[in-house]
Amino acid sequence: MERSVAAVVMVEEADAWLWESPLVLAATPIGNLADATDRLRRLIRSAEVIACEDTRSTRHLIRALGEQTSARLVSLHEHNEAARSAELVEQAGAGTRVLVVSDAGMPAVSDPGQRLVAAAVHAGVAVTAAPGASAVPTALALSGLATDRFCFAGFVPRKQSDRRALLDRLGREEWTTVLFESPHRIAATVAEFAEALGGHRRAAVARELTKRYEEVLRGDLDHLTQSLAERQGGPGLKGEFVLLVAGVSGGDLQGQEPLTLQEAAQLVLEQAASGQRMKTAAKQIAAENRLNASGLYDAANRLRRQQ
């Protein structure tokens, strides 16, 4: 990736406008290399330092794009971002052209970069972004769900208490929620969401976005649970996954104010007394009242022991 001094000077003169801010976060393709912008290519050629989530992946990307750079590649990942940010901000503040990229998509969006931006802002060092491909808006646009209001919640948490908190929020959330999940857990996660939020809740699962085998599954959570279960162990569950869950609509509340947890728990017990399975009643009533089904089931059990 070496270049002559003359070539470097020519690049610097042609692309000086790119570096009005010495620290630039640039989006990289999430699959299709044709999504690399001309601005990204020019930033790669003219950067002096490129901070990468994985230097090997970035070297591979540069070669795949047919580009060259004389920049020094340094790592910037979740384990060293706090320490490395101070170094990069100091270099940018001294006039060094610092480009920040992640393995795919936009840095700082569920990827390293947020701490670096915060450090740059605190130090008064100018920072900007070169926009481009990102899995979040791409999946949202293809989902068929509401796009006027949405929230991004990152990766579905593995810790049970954090998952419970997420499901509690989704039980009340009125906006579309976008999440990332691994191919090894996507089927179980969708099934868990169906159980907690109600199988009628609309959702979508997108995989391999912008790549050859791009696919978007749409329907309610029960339908998606069945579709993913049929594909477990096969090629249909490989790749990168984005899970999108529709918000609770006014229709889901049937024109009424949602019940409190205590009121809903009492209703679960009444329906169970009439012969309905308690778990089924909790699932149905939770979906109608923006409550978490597991939490409601536990509350109903506590209330039954008290009575």
Image (cartoon, grey):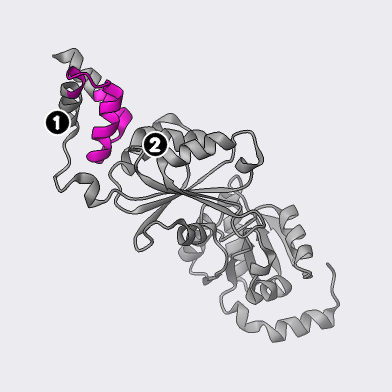
Element marked by disc 2: helix
Image quarter hosting the N terminus: bottom right
Visible residue check, residue 185: no
Within 10 angstroms of label 2, few (less than 14), some, or many (20 or more) residues?
many
Q: Nearer the viewer, residue 305 or 142?
A: 142
| x and y percentages locating residue 157 in the rendered image | 47, 38
| x and y percentages locating residue 98 in the rendered image | 64, 67
Q: Nearer the viewer, residue 247 or 49?
A: 247
Is residue 37 covered in magenta?
Answer: no
Q: Are marks 1 and 2 in contact (CB under 8 Å)?
A: no
Q: Quadrant of residue 113?
A: bottom right
| x and y percentages locating residue 278 in the rendered image | 26, 21
Q: Which residue does the numbered mark 1 point to in the structure image?
A: 263
Is residue 277 covered in magenta?
Answer: yes
Q: Quadrant of residue 51?
A: bottom right
Residue numbers of the magenta segment: 271-299
> Which comes before the other along the chain, label 1 or label 2?
2
Within 10 angstroms of label 1, few (less than 14), some, or many (20 or more) residues?
few
Q: Amino acid at mark 2?
A: Ala
Q: Is residue 94 above or below residue 17?
A: above
How many numbered callouts?
Answer: 2
Q: Is residue 287 above or below residue 68?
A: above
Element marked by disc 1: helix
Residue at image position (81%, 81%) is 7
Visible residue check, residue 148: yes
Q: Left or right: 115 with respect to 150? A: right
Q: Amino acid at mark 1?
A: Glu
Q: Which residue does the numbered mark 2 point to in the structure image?
A: 194
Residue at image position (30%, 26%) is 280
Q: CA distance from mark 1 to mark 2?
A: 22 Å
